[in-house]
Amino acid sequence: MIVVHHLNDSRSQRILWLLEELGLPYEIVRYQRDAQTRLAPPELKAVSPLGKSPVITDDGVRVMESGAIVDHVIRRHGGGRLQPDPATPAYDEYVQWLHYAEGSAMLPLMLHLYVSRLGEAGAPLAPRIEGEIANHLGHLDASLRGREYLMGDRLTGADVQMSFVAELAGKLGKRARYTAVEAWVARLHARPAYKAALERGGPYGLAQ
């Protein structure tokens, strides 16, 4: 049985969605952010040395980091679903998206989130951060033009992994002018499995 250590309003929501897409049974252990600091509770340290979510256990095997979890679940339990054939060039593009989400695309959004709290002290950094956000969202938008999903006409783990990037961009008010990204997010949010994951996971402030 897969157990998801789920923190509210976090990257772990996309793991619940992935499991719903695959129709896999799973259990949720819930953790709540501090209402003031928005930090994860110390109890998460018991399952993750960093105190971060998501973390899953799968028959006693602990897996951390969203990209690693997406890869593990699809590879172990997907039966060929939600990924291209590993023998094709499309698989390399798919793996690139898995790594790109957290390796590059999330950085300027997180910088914006933290630097904006500095007020005037952070102002000198704003143009560079905004430029990088536009760079990455522009790349995502161009990649989605003429496609239903990142890899073509079918959902894959790449869409699941990249969804949090677009959702956070929307929360920060950075997504509206990227019409292909907006349409893609709407398609993701309309999926029955996405809605089922929201029901299981509880309130999720980025589902907009």
Image (cartoon, rainbow, N blue to C red):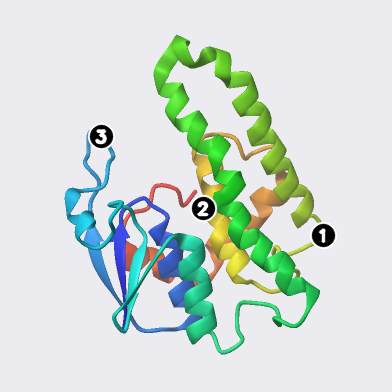
Relative placement, left or right, of 9 versus 31 is right
Marker disc for residue 37: 3
Q: Is residue 39 visible?
A: yes
Mark 2–mark 3 CB contact (< 8 Å): no
Q: Which residue is mark 2?
A: 164
Q: Which residue is mark 1?
A: 146
Q: Nearer the viewer, residue 181 or 108?
A: 108
Relative placement, left or right, of 81 versus 154 is left
Q: CA distance from mark 2 to mark 3?
A: 21 Å
Q: Nearer the viewer, residue 194 or 11?
A: 11
In what element is the residue under mark 2?
helix
Q: Residues within 10 Å of mark 2 (few under 14, many from 20)?
A: many
Q: Earlier in the sequence, mark 1 or mark 2?
A: 1
Q: Residue furthest bottom?
A: 79
Residue found at x 36% / y 84%: 25
Q: Is residue 21 visible?
A: no
Q: Amino acid at mark 1?
A: Gly
The N terminus lies in quadrant: bottom left
Q: Amino acid at mark 3?
A: Thr
Q: Earlier in the sequence, mark 3 or mark 1?
A: 3
